[in-house]
Image (tube, rainbow, N blue to C red):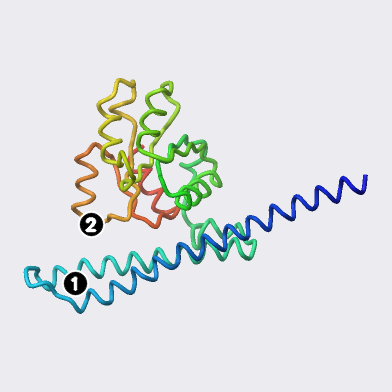
Amino acid sequence: MFGIGKKKDDKNSDKIEEERRFVSELSYNVRNPLNTICGITEITKKVIMNDCDKDTLLSYVDILGDAATELQQTIDHFFECFETGNYAALHGTNTGEVDSSILNNLRVMVVEDSSVSQLIAKEMLESRGSIVTVCDSGKEGVDLFNKSVTGTYDVILMDINMPGMDGYEATDAIRNGSHPQAKSIPIIAMTAEALPDDIQTALRTGMNGHISKPINVEKIVSAIKGVL
């Protein structure tokens, strides 16, 4: 009896250690590119191309810098929660004031190729009562939607930049498909591309709304309320 218990404890210990190593490695791999982005942003500010208006170029650079900084802070918070075991804090700060009741029992398809972004979106939604299906690619999202019965999904959160079939192509494929909800299923873009032109492109493609990354509960609730 004691031997069996020890083996179980050893397995749990090994699993915890494996998860810690995964988080540590993921933290290093994610933070390094983000630090590079922030550094390149500062360098780019000093390099004004001859054929580009200075104010226009700097405005784009500032947007890049702000997005990179915000993403850095979000991911730092994400890993801090795992390292300290404070999983409740994954819900984010100051989100208690947001009425997220619309997410309860909401059937959501998340189409996202990044495993980290998948985990964040899934946690935010499921912790508030949503029923979440995650697809790793645009093609998988289209195929799963087309095979589903009417009413399986209430809304689709669609990443834009994905290898193979991107979010625009996936949305177009859904809208032009034969599914009974092809024209009516709300599709919300979920992307770091947050310029006005990017939002208009998403709407022209057949999407109904837009969430800028890094996502949070307030953004998700606002976008979903806008399409339901």
Name the quadrant of the C terminus.
Answer: top left
* Image location (x, y in percent) of residue 26: 51, 60
Q: Residue at x 33, y 20 (%)?
A: 180
Q: Residue at x 33, y 21 (%)?
A: 179
Residue at the far left: name it: 51
* Image location (x, y in percent) of residue 113: 41, 45
Residue, disc 1: 58
Q: Label 1 is placed on what type of residue?
A: Leu
Residue at the far bottom: name it: 46
Labels in figure, total: 2
Residue, disc 2: 195
Tell me the distance, in whole angstroms, between the alpha carbons under discs 2 and 1: 14 Å
Secondary structure, mark 2, is: loop
Locate residue 172: give its quadrant. Answer: top left
* Image location (x, y in percent) of residue 103: 48, 42
> Is residue 82 rendered to the left or right of residue 76?
right
Label 1 crowd bin: few (<14), some (14–19), many (20+), radius 10 Å = some
Looking at the image, is mark 2 or mark 1 earlier in the sequence?
1
Q: Label 2 is placed on what type of residue?
A: Leu
Q: Nearer the viewer, residue 73 or 112?
A: 112
Q: Residue at x 45, y 37 (%)?
A: 108
Whether residue 39 is situated above or below residue 179 in the rendered picture: below
